[in-house]
Image (tube, grey):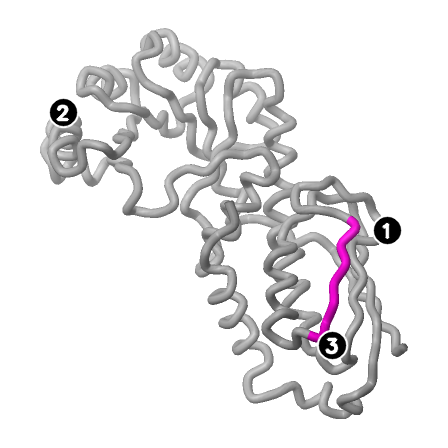
Amino acid sequence: MLPPDIKAIVAIALAEDVGGGDLTAALIPSERPAQATVVTREDAVLCGIPWFLEVYAQLDPAVSVQWDVADGDLVRSGQLLCRLTGPARSLLTGERTALNFLQTLSGTATLTRRYVEAVAGTHAAILDTRKTLPGLRQAQKYAVAKAGGRNHRMGLYDAFLIKENHIMAAGSIQAAVRLARSHAPDMSVEVEVEDLAELEEALEAGSDVVLLDNFDLPTMANAVVLNEGRAKLEASGNVSLEMVRAIAETGVDFISVGSLTKDLRAVDLSLRFQLS
């Protein structure tokens, strides 16, 4: 599903970039028509079309954009992505903001697809985290889903994730899970554990999901055996593209990867402008 905050996020981005007006674009006659194309300079998984379109919708409804691809598509270096026509001023004013959304979300989608492909054929699903760019959480999680990953909780409000400090404050894993169940019975309860003893305690407490924090591979495999399907198991902590396949092969259900949204590299895109 498309995030509901696209209009608001785009409005903020345009205000940040355009402010009181584009001084340089004002040098161009207002009636001058133009056209442009967007191409990718590298192989990537495309994402961010709704944000790109919203930039121009807010700037100038006279701008028309025709796409040859869709979000989630694999695109190749040199491939034409879309064509734009409209007033020259508007095309140039929106260029940077529109490309920022497209290249950033494509970066998230591209990295996600690499992780998803690395665990293909195993039982494990790739999850994102809350380690997102401020203001772009819903957008980045959309990009993860478009690339074949799955979304973890959106924020602090839609699932419990009981960590070490929560356990310490509650008194024990059992107590923390009991409090969570009484506070919001319909919410998923996940508990982070650091060893097999804590795993057993979390399972006995009735956790829905147990997060295995920085377990090595042999211990992770032992955790899967100990679990016996009682809860879903999530592996987390310093997951790399080189190691993710081995982690998946231990039999865990989920692998959360913070780098999908916090360490991304934007895809290299180019808008080529031409006066009509």
Most foreground residue, 174 or 89: 89
Between marks 3 and 2, how big is the CA–CA gap?
59 Å
Q: Position of residue 267 (x, y in %)?
A: 70, 52
Q: Is residue 8 left or right of residue 104?
A: left
- Amino acid, disc 1: Gly
Most foreground residue, 60 or 227: 60
- Whether the residues at callouts 3 and 1 have beta carbons within 8 Å, the answer is no
Q: Position of residue 108 (x, y in %)?
A: 59, 46
Q: Is residue 5 left or right of residue 56?
A: left
Q: Is residue 200 above or below residue 81?
A: above
Residue found at x 80% / y 70%: 85
Q: Which mark is residue 174?
A: 2
Q: Which mark is residue 92?
A: 3
Q: Quadrant of the C terminus?
A: bottom right
Q: Which mark is residue 78?
A: 1
Q: Which residues are magenta?
A: 62-68
Judged by depth in the image, the label closer to the viewer, 2 or 1, is 1
